[in-house]
Amino acid sequence: MPKHWKPHPRSWVFHVPNPSRCQGEALPPPWSSLMSKKIERVQAGEKVFDWLLLLLSIGVLVEAYRIDGGLRLNSAGSFPVGLALVMLASSLAILASHRYKRRDERIHSALHEFQVFLHDHFRPHIVVFSIAAVIYLAAIVWASFYVSTFLFLAAMFIYLRQGRVISSLVITAVALAIIYVLFTVVFRVYLP
């Protein structure tokens, strides 16, 4: 700390006798630490998501434990139990790191936070893609993998690329050809 900085006797405020001498020098520790502190904010719905992640981690741990019904290192359930423990530890660490964060001061109630969450995370392209993905998963059961994948990829490329039909169909055909060569020819994996 520079020699001309003198602490005020009754507080942490520093008295600067000649400000012109202090140009270009760093602020003393109390000022620099107070000026750098800022309140961290969580996004709308983030704390609720943290708790849901913790519940999911506990559920995964319970299901992983039920694979063998015991904790043996060489059992089939040891790897899933280990992954579930990592998930549980991670979700607890996330919860601990968010405990002092506050929500945005522009959000006034839980209902308003829910509305902000819906606006931020359920935009039209996300909703359309999610619905198409569910339909695609259902279509794999009664249509072949290649037909349903072609229709899904073509529809999504056309939608997300805002109507570029020809290039979207070419991209879809190339992607499907790569999938066919890798899984059917090279690895000889049966695709439904």
Image (tube, rainbow, N blue to C red):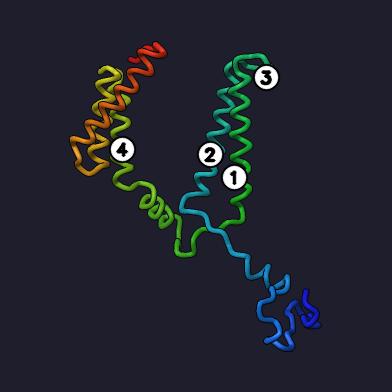
> Which amino acid type corresponds to the residue marked 2 in the rendered image?
Leu
How busy is the neighbourhood of tag 4: few (under 14 within 10 Å), some, or many (20 plus)? some
Cα–Cα gap, marks 4 and 2: 23 Å
Residue 164, above or below 76: below
- Quadrant the C terminus occupies: top left
| Mark linked to residue 156 | none
**Residue 154 image point, x, y percent:** 24, 31
Cα–Cα gap, marks 3 and 2: 23 Å
> Which amino acid type corresponds to the residue marked 4 in the rendered image?
Phe
Tag in front: 3 or 1: 1
Tag in front: 4 or 2: 4
The residue to which callout 4 is attached is 129
Task: Identify the element where label 1 is drawn.
Answer: helix
The residue to which callout 3 is attached is 71
Residue found 49% across the figure and 61% down from its top: 104
Q: Sequence order check: which comes first, mark 1 or mark 4?
A: 1
Q: Give residue 182's quadrant in the image.
A: top left
Task: Identify the element where label 3 is drawn.
Answer: loop
123 to the left or right of 73: left
| Mark linked to residue 94 | 1
